[in-house]
Amino acid sequence: MGARAALLLGLLAAAALAAPAARAEAGRTPVWAKTTLSAPGHYVLTRDLSDVPPVVTITSPDVVLDLDGHTITATDATNAAVLVTPPAASSGSIEIRRGRVRGGSRAVWHSGPSDLSKVWLLLEELDLSTQGDSPLVVQSALFAEVVRCSVHDSPGIAPAIWIEALYQPKITAVITGNVVSSVGGPGIQVDRLGGGVIRDNVVRGWGTTIPSTAISIDGAGSNLGGAIIAGNAVHGESATPSGRGIVVSGQAHRTAVRNNVVTGAVEYGIEVHSNGNGLTANVVRVTGPRGIGLYGHDNLVEANQITRSSGDGIVVSGSANLLEANTASGNGGMGITFLGVDNAYRKNVLRNNTSGAVDGWAIDGGGNIP
Amino acid sequence: MRANACVGIVLLASLAAPAARGDGRIALWRPTVIDSPGHYVVTRDIFPSSSVPTSSTIEIRATDVVLDLNGHTVFGSSESTIRIVATTAPGSIEIRNGLLRREGADGLLYQEAASGGSATRLRLERLDISGPGVRAAIHVTGAPVVEILRCSIRAPNAYAGIEIWPGSLARWTGLIADNRLRDIAGQGIAVIGMAGGLIAHNVVTEFGTFYFGETVPPFAIHVDGGHGGIRIEGNLVHGEGYLPHLHGIVLDDLGPASAVVDNVLSGNLYAGIWTQAHGGLVAGNVVGATWTFGMLIDGNENTVSRNVVESGDMGVAIRGRHNLVDSNLIEGHWSYGLNFGTDGAGTNVYRGNMLHNNPGTPVVGEAVDGGGNLQ
């Protein structure tokens, strides 16, 4: 071996250490090809991946998958691009963050076990899109957190961010700071929510394939709930008003819906089907036929601004609700229509509505300005 | 030829060995005592070693230190994984971006100076702390300013996830935000002697899984011996345990002018919010699915407004004086919606509340009806 060969050997060894696959330092495992992560650890993607799905499968709890700005692309829709399937009786956390996932039946899918899973799932700063049914589905975790993700350009009809308890009695969730745009079905949907926060999200251009709801939750029944939906901005962009803005379904009692803005081509701005909720300080200006609809009982609706719907500002089908200090003005129908019994209203401003201020029967608590 | 081969080997060694970095940062790769200011970067996982003259894996005995764990794990032994022995010199210590796996003791321990007190601020960010130790995952005594941000904590045997004491300072201030605490045997976040601060957007669940006795009450967020000016905002507390005394947010003997706003308390809780503070604001909270009380207000001159409360047995109990209960939604309680205890002697006021659907009694006890209540 000559001198040049020896030097070359040394340089090659040095280059090998500096190569991307080895750049993940001790304690962090590089990922550079289609793989299954079956042991706890901190994994770092070292280059873009493109393969048949699932491109990355996570089967162990206590895994951190850092995409480090790279892209995972599934080349067909036979499975999820990133599939998370922790084993039965799992406990621990799984984190996926900082990168893009494209394609697959779902871009990211947590398919939890059918036993009482105690997995915590954290999805942070991901950019997700797919031609499959949904960009992000979380099923059967104890807790799910989706933070600062962008979910977009996905024509599937399942919810773009879909959190559901499935095999569990409930799921606790925090969904904050996300942007959902140009998706075929619902924007954000949480089923059997047992304690949750949905805050500061932007949903714009949902339901491009079928009419659907921007943000909706359903609860876990008695003694498991409580949630806040606050500070979200929802804007409908379809050619004609369609779908709903924010929906609180029949089992999601004790929800606070406050400080949200719902605008644009939306059929119904905010609908509440459950009981004992507080709707406060929301701004609703939709082109559809209803600003706010109440179908449950014992709800408090206070200081909301509802204008310019093509129909009624507020429709109350349930009973024993209180409407206070709202402004329902400039709507194409009534300011408020009462269809249920034992409802009350006071201190509302109900001016300039085409069909009148109030229709139906309710207790006038005084201070209303027709 | 030998010379050329040597160049290659030296080049190889320079890449493989942790060494001082050209950017002025100092590489760490083994148990260390940091006794000089600087910006330290961990370059590989660090395990405890008996050859290092400290019981903790990393010990900090200087101010103006930044310790970037760089995504790596520091493992502990029977002692604290990282220990800070503070000095009385002004300055700061910042630790971030990594994992602490503790064994017998605290994950991170901040001790005040031996002479008492400290002027060293502490900032912890993006730490993931777990392990079987009984002591708190984060235990701070005597830091004047504490920031704990975006940390994840699991402490299945510990009496607390985060515990902060004033030490000889008597009071301190801080920011505890966006942390995730789960699987905590005792309390989630316990702060003693806080004077001005923010506890916000934390998630605490699966706490109180083991009852240590009355000295360690199983509270999710516990503010004790405070000095007021504290805002507890936007936290999510979910009671997963089955001990009978889980509480959500508790303010013991707190000074005036604090706020508990926009929190969600749910699951198996004995009480959602319990405050003995005076002159504070309890507003916009959602309290659901507790076992007994939605809210217990033992202090005086508080405003309780715009909360949504449904808590199983009893809604809101007011046991202090001169409190205002305004525009709350309190429904679905078997015993009562609002209960004004005898200690209030008719000095409390309630108005504009919605008290439907309380099968027991909507309002119990003597208080001033300010009008507009719906029952």
Image: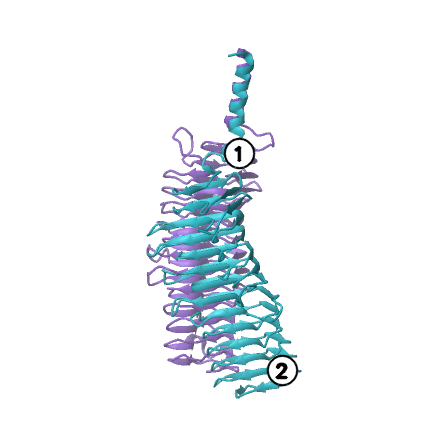
Mark 2 and mark 1 in contact (Cβ < 8 Å)? Answer: no
Q: Chain of mark 2?
A: A
Q: Earlier in the sequence, mark 1 or mark 2?
A: 1
Residue at 36%, 42% (x, y): give it. Answer: B104
Q: Nearer the viewer, residue B138 or A214?
A: A214
Amino acid type at mark 1: Pro
Label 1 residue SS: helix
Label 2 residue SS: loop
* Image spot of residue B4 (x, y percent): 56, 14
Residue at 60%, 29% (x, y): give it. Answer: B22
In the picture of the structure, the residue carrying the numbered disc 2 is A350
Label 2 neighbourhood size at 10 Å, few (<14), some (14-19), many (20+)?
many
Q: Which chain is purple?
A: B
Tag of residue B344:
none
Q: Nearer the viewer, residue B107 or A33?
A: A33
Q: In this rendering, do the residues under marks 1 and 2 share a single chain?
A: yes
Is residue B290 toward the left or the right of residue A336 in the image? left
Question: Is residue B191 positioned above or below A352 on the image?
Answer: above
Quarter of the image with the N terminus of chain B in it: top right
Amino acid type at mark 2: Leu
The colour applied to the residues of chain A in this rendering is cyan
Residue at 50%, 78% (x, y): give it. Answer: B353
In the picture of the structure, the residue carrying the numbered disc 1 is A20
Q: How many marks?
A: 2
Label 1 neighbourhood size at 10 Å, few (<14), some (14-19), many (20+)?
some
* Image spot of residue A238 (x, y percent): 61, 67
